[in-house]
Amino acid sequence: GDDLVPFKVSVMAKPAKIEQKTEDRKVTRVEILVSPPAINGLIGTTNSMRVSSVRDQRKLIDCETTGTPVPRVMWVLPENVVLPAPYYGSRMTVHRNGTLDIRSVRMTDAGQLACIARNEGGETKLVVHLDVTDILERPKLKSPKMESLLLTVGRTINLNCSFEGSPTPQLTWILLNGSPLLSGAQFNKFLHKSDGTLVISNPALSEAGTYRCLGRNAAGMVERTVTLMPGHKPEINNRYNSPVSIMNGQSLHLHCLSNTDSVHLAWTLPSGMVLNRPQRAGRYAVLPNGTLSIQQAAVHDRGSYTCRASNEYGSSLLTVPVIIIAYPPRVTSGPVPATYAKRGVAVQLNCLAIDRTRLIGSLIIQNPTIRDAGLYRCTARNVVGVDSKITKLS
């Protein structure tokens, strides 16, 4: 890798005596691989963490190192007291693996400590903020104990977890494979931030599952679980198995019922017009529940209506064919072909037509004169046809 530093070492080998009594030289090339130290699996040359302890209790603070060659480890305590590994004192010990062991914590131990690891590849530091308390309080969740969230492929997701307690609880996230992730640590797509948030970058469907957040202190442990569920496109719960038929002039209601209210819902009319929920345009309206309402449907409203329910995971369609039934009007009872009237005597011309309903139209001439004589036509008309009757008034 980039952190490997090659060294060339020339080794002189003293040859055996040979008859020619000449000196042979053998050159051997040796590469020494060096990698800088890492502490507790954390990346970077400087990291920090906060730990807590209770007065008079034992406290272990890990400083496990890796690197080539094996790093030299030391702890720097407040007031610049340096303890190398290993170190054996009456109250404090630094074990060979770098762990700082405080047998009986005092209030004065609180403050900033640092574990420093060095080798030929460089230096790495872990800064530890030690809190000491004399009160024990079991961790309490600030978030719900259980939560379910929708996972969107490729979209970074944050899983929150926070506790309160005394001493301050230490947070650990348990990943799907059972691996623990301490505060400040990063593993592949996962980052455990110092505020307890687990950040999952560019998640795939394989990241769906249950994640556990553990809050521990000397008084106990509390667990929170967050389940990531893969999102699904919305479903439309109702269907139309046959075309919808209504009479010309009636109101039309087409339903589009989705399994969630959070989806984007729109109707496309046969004319190509698109109406979103909720929206109104003249005789057309998409109601808050997704129903398309058409007042006084006309013949030109016939055709296919499409409802589209969509969210970030996809869309579903519902297509409804609509038939508008209309008949041409028919004049069933009109005036006789010839009507006779007397001057000054009112005359009534009756006309009865059938459309969707019975239509009655009467023409009354109150005081007929010779000028009112002539042809009179009764006409019934709708969108699909026309019918008429004629009478001659004499």
Image (cartoon, rainbow, N blue to C red):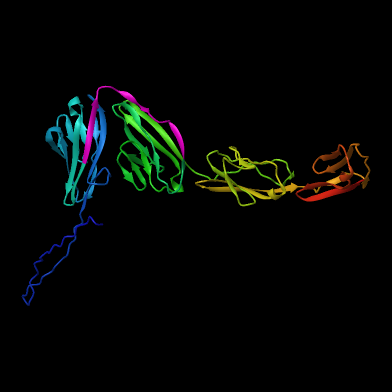
Range of the magenta residues?
A: 126-149
Q: Residue at x 92, y 39 (%)?
A: 343
Q: Is residue 256 visible?
A: no
User: Is 296 left, or right, of 120 in this rendering?
Assistant: right
> In the image, residue 179 lies at what x, y percent?
36, 42
Q: Is residue 132 magenta?
A: yes
Task: Check the image and report above or below for 260 versus 35.
Answer: above
Q: Quadrant of the N terminus?
A: bottom left
Residue shown at the point (61%, 52%) measured from the top left: 272
> Does the magenta segment cover residue 207?
no
Q: Quadrant of residue 53?
A: top left
The foreground one among 216 and 44 is: 44
Task: Write the residue at 17% across / 64% down.
Answer: 29
Q: Is residue 207 above or below residue 139?
A: below
Comparing 232 with 206, the one in front is 232
Asked whether residue 328 appears in the rendered view, the answer is yes
Query: In the image, residue 347 lies at what x, y percent?
Result: 89, 38
Q: Is 247 left or right of 159, judged from the image as shown?
A: right
Q: Residue furthest bottom?
A: 20
